[in-house]
Amino acid sequence: MSTLTVAAPSAEGTPLNRPGQRGRTTLTDRVVTKVAAQAVSEVERTGGVAPQLMGITLGRQSGSGSARVSARIDGHLTMIQLRLTLAYPAPVRTLTQQVRRHVIERVTSLTGLEVRHVDIEVARLLRGR
Amino acid sequence: MTSKAASARAPADVAGLADLIARAVTRCPSVAGLTETPGIPVATYLPGRTVSGVAVRAGEVEVSVVARYGLPLPQVAAEIRQAVEPLVPGRDVDVVIADITSPPARAGAKSGAGAKSGAAERPRAPVPADGRNEAK
């Protein structure tokens, strides 16, 4: 009788075990956040957002910097929230779908996690980008 | 050699093992460095110094790293495990990927959806053939 040892899922980590390898692999939320932010920047006609403090935008919304991403890992699933700007004469629905698809593809292939959902908030449409 | 001498030497062995593991992990091409995860302290505390990112325990060894952007992270973990396992036969090797480095900025990298090449194009850095003994 052969038994397959599987690590118990930790509270905030993710077991990515394969038989023959001993030990757990844990990813932090920060890793998913960075991969998703990079994926957003790879899609054309997207921009970053100005930082917010207690709901008030600090500075001008110029589209520079990177999109604000928060991600949470739960088991082998991850939930991602994005806040970004888009270039003005762009079809918002098409573009956000493109962003969502690209983020899912990158996060899935680089982290091995399953992306449960990607929430996108478009902070502003920017002219001249 | 008495048992007293053996027990007196034990902390030095732990120190040596932690250093060996740290060196083996940082030699992996897809590892940018060792780190202490905020909230999950992974470190070996030795007299006078600390080895960050490596914890040697009875049945397991835990390492906490910053990975380089590019390679799928399960593969990075496997690489680390392969490097560490020969040093600690029979123990679990737990890998925490606490962070990743930002990818190098490339001109004209914006490509829309369907860019599929990113994962496989990382060049492999040459690994020194006999790096393990260089610091002894």
Image (cartoon, rainbow, N blue to C red):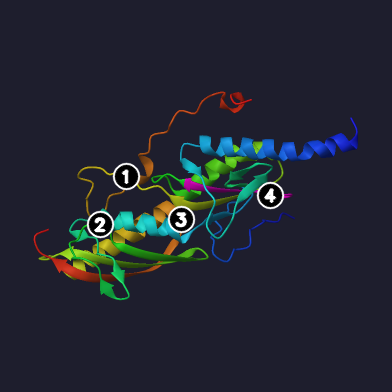
What is the C-alpha distance between the residues marked 2 and 3? 27 Å
Determine crowd level at label 1: few under 14, some 14-19, many 20+ residues with C-alpha closer than 10 A: few
Q: Secondary structure at mark 2?
A: loop
Report whether residue A79 is seen: yes
Determine crowd level at label 4: few under 14, some 14-19, many 20+ residues with C-alpha closer than 10 A: some
Q: Mark 2, mark 3: which one is toward the viewer?
A: 2
**Which residue was labeled with disc 2?**
A65
Q: At 52% across and 38% down in the image, what residue appears?
A: B26
What is the C-alpha distance between the residues marked 4 and 1? 36 Å
Disc 2 residue type (three-letter): Gly
Report whether residue A91 is seen: no
Residue B122's place in the image compared with A2, above or below, is above
Residue A33: image quadrant is bottom left
Q: Secondary structure at mark 4?
A: strand
Determine crowd level at label 2: few under 14, some 14-19, many 20+ residues with C-alpha closer than 10 A: few
**Which residue was labeled with disc 1?**
B117
Give the dominant element type of the magenta stretch: helix, strand or loop: strand
- Work out whether disc 4 and disc 2 sit on a shared chain: no
**Which residue was labeled with disc 4?**
B60
Q: Is residue B62 magenta?
A: yes
Disc 3 residue type (three-letter): Gly
The magenta segment is: B55-66
- Work out whether disc 2 and disc 3 sit on a shared chain: yes
Q: Secondary structure at mark 1?
A: loop
Q: Secondary structure at mark 3?
A: loop
Chain label for disc 1: B
Left-right relation of B67 to B20:
left
**Which residue was labeled with disc 3?**
A112
